[in-house]
Structure formats: structure tokens, C-alpha cells
Amino acid sequence: NDALGYQSFLNLLIYPNPFQSMLYCKGELAERGNVDVTLLDVLGNIIHQKSLFDITAFKLELETDSLTPGVYFIQVFTF
């Protein structure tokens, strides 16, 4: 934990880049905690959001077949 209470990631992988039909996000926390993963378009609109609670590791598989080709951002943070 840092001074604000946020957990540190031991590992965080987001792949492939660029993605086509699937986007994978997996990580491991230094200590048990909560993680929020959000996929946003270039305008900041939330495309997908998932919160995971009381975990030490996670793996998300996001189907991206329906997305328009373009630039997307992914935010991954602990809380």
C-alpha cells in the first residue's frame, strides 16, 4: 500500500496491441485488493467497465468484434 492506500501491481499485461477481436488484461497485485478496468474510446466514452473485489490476480477477456476501428484507452487502477 502507498500513503493513499492504493495497491501496487506486481504484473500488468494488456495485449495484443493493436487488438482485433479480443483484448486481454491480466494482472497480479502485491496484496489482496480491488481493481477497476475501464475501456474508453477517444472521446472518453466508457465502452466497457469491470470492477473486481478482494482479489490478488485477475484475467479479463474483452470481446471487441463490435468496436469501430480506432484509438481506445484502457484504465486499470486499484481502489
Image: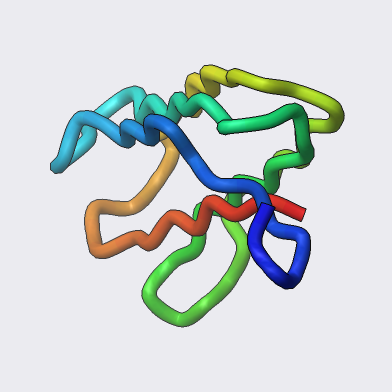
Residue 48 drawn above or below residue 32: below
Q: Nearer the viewer, residue 48 or 37?
A: 37
Q: Is residue 5 left or right of residue 43?
A: right
Q: Nearer the viewer, residue 60 or 34?
A: 34
Residue 19 drawn above or below residue 46: above
Residue 50 drawn above or below residue 45: above
| Number of marks | 0
| The C terminus, quarter of image | bottom right
Evaluate whether residue 43 shows in this view: yes
Evaluate whether residue 65 shows in this view: no
Identity of the residue drawn at 77% across and 40% down: 34
Q: Quadrant of residue 45?
A: bottom right
Identity of the residue drawn at 75% across and 28% down: 32
x%, y% of residue 25? 43, 30
Identity of the residue drawn at 35% across and 24% down: 22
Applied colour scheme? rainbow
Q: Is residue 55 left or right of residue 38?
A: right
Q: Nearer the viewer, residue 15 or 46?
A: 15
x%, y% of residue 3? 70, 70
Identity of the residue drawn at 14% across and 42% down: 18
